[in-house]
């Protein structure tokens, strides 16, 4: 009788562990899908960020100002190109990791878990780096730099600055999602 009771308890414990394991896999899948969506949206918002304005330039104070059509695009600044590339790379990686997660289901080896952990860690670093680079240039656009005579541009290209700021914020959220994924992956290691 006691053996039968132990078997029932072991069965209940196994069922409880399976439910916890399934909920962790569900959380991981949800976080990966969220990471995919965030990186895709951030890359798209930054990729389409463009604004054209007519700007008056005074060459000589005695002459009338000269009106020049000027365009602001994300591709004109290397920091924005880096952020866009980082989001695109993370988006593709996330799609591949979701496919691996779906194919491997419950039979993941330690090597596969370690490979995904390292990939998630690299994506997290890449996204935080892209956020920092684009954020620094964005701040320069908002505040300018008096020391090197760089003027503010966000007062002229407001729509462009709002789009790039939204992309940077979304990229930061994606980096935080990958940080959570790194923690979840690390908890799976024996």
Image (cartoon, rainbow, N blue to C red):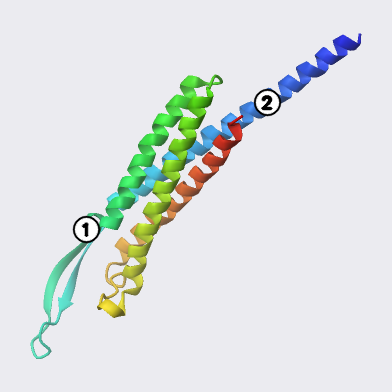
Q: Is residue 132 above or below residue 147?
A: above
Q: Is residue 76 left or right of residue 130?
A: left
Q: Is residue 105 left or right of residue 171?
A: right
Disc ID at residue 146: none
The reply to whether dot 2 and dot 1 touch (C-beta < 8 Å) is: no
Quarter containing the C terminus: top right
Residue 158 in sight: yes
**Residue 163 appears at what percent x and percent y?**
34, 58
Mark 2: secondary structure: helix
Task: Tell me which corner region of the image, top left, top right, bottom left or bottom right, holds residue 93.
Answer: top left
Q: Residues within 10 Å of mark 1 (few under 14, many from 20)?
A: few
**Residue 166 appears at what percent x and percent y?**
40, 57
Q: CA distance from mark 2 to mark 1?
A: 51 Å
For mark 2, what is the residue? 19
Disc ID at residue 76: 1
**Residue 73 appears at what percent x and percent y?**
23, 58
Mark 1: secondary structure: helix
Q: Is residue 137 above or below residue 75?
A: below
Task: Tell me which corner region of the image, top left, top right, bottom left or bottom right, holds residue 60.
Answer: bottom left
Q: Return the disc, 2 or 1, that comes first in the chain's sequence.
A: 2
Residue sitting at x 67%, y 23%? 18
Q: Is residue 155 left or right of residue 59?
A: right
Q: Residue furthest right?
A: 1
Q: Is residue 104 above or below residue 29?
A: above
Residue sitting at x 34%, y 40%? 89
Residue sitting at x 17%, y 66%? 70
Q: Residues within 10 Å of mark 2 (few under 14, many from 20)?
A: few
Q: Residue furthest bottom?
A: 62
């Amino acid at each position: 009788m006691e053996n039968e009771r132990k078997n029932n308890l072991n069965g209940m414990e196994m069922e409880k562990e399976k439910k916890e394991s399934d909920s962790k896999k569900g959380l991981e899948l949800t976080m990966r899908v969220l990471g995919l969506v965030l990186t895709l949206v951030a890359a798209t918002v930054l990729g389409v960020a463009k604004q054209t304005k007519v700007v008056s330039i005074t060459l000589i104070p005695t002459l009338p100002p000269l009106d020049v059509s000027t365009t602001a695009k994300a591709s004109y600044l290397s920091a924005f190109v880096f952020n866009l590339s980082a989001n695109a790379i993370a988006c593709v990686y996330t799609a591949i990791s979701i496919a691996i997660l779906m194919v491997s289901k419950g039979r993941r080896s330690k090597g596969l878990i370690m490979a995904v952990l390292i990939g998630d860690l690299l994506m997290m670093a890449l996204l935080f780096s892209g956020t920092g680079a684009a954020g620094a240039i964005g701040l320069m656009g908002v505040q300018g730099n008096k020391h090197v005579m760089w003027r503010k541009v966000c007062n002229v290209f407001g729509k462009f600055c709002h789009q790039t700021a939204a992309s940077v914020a979304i990229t930061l959220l994606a980096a935080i999602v990958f940080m959570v994924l790194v923690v979840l992956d690390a908890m799976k290691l024996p």
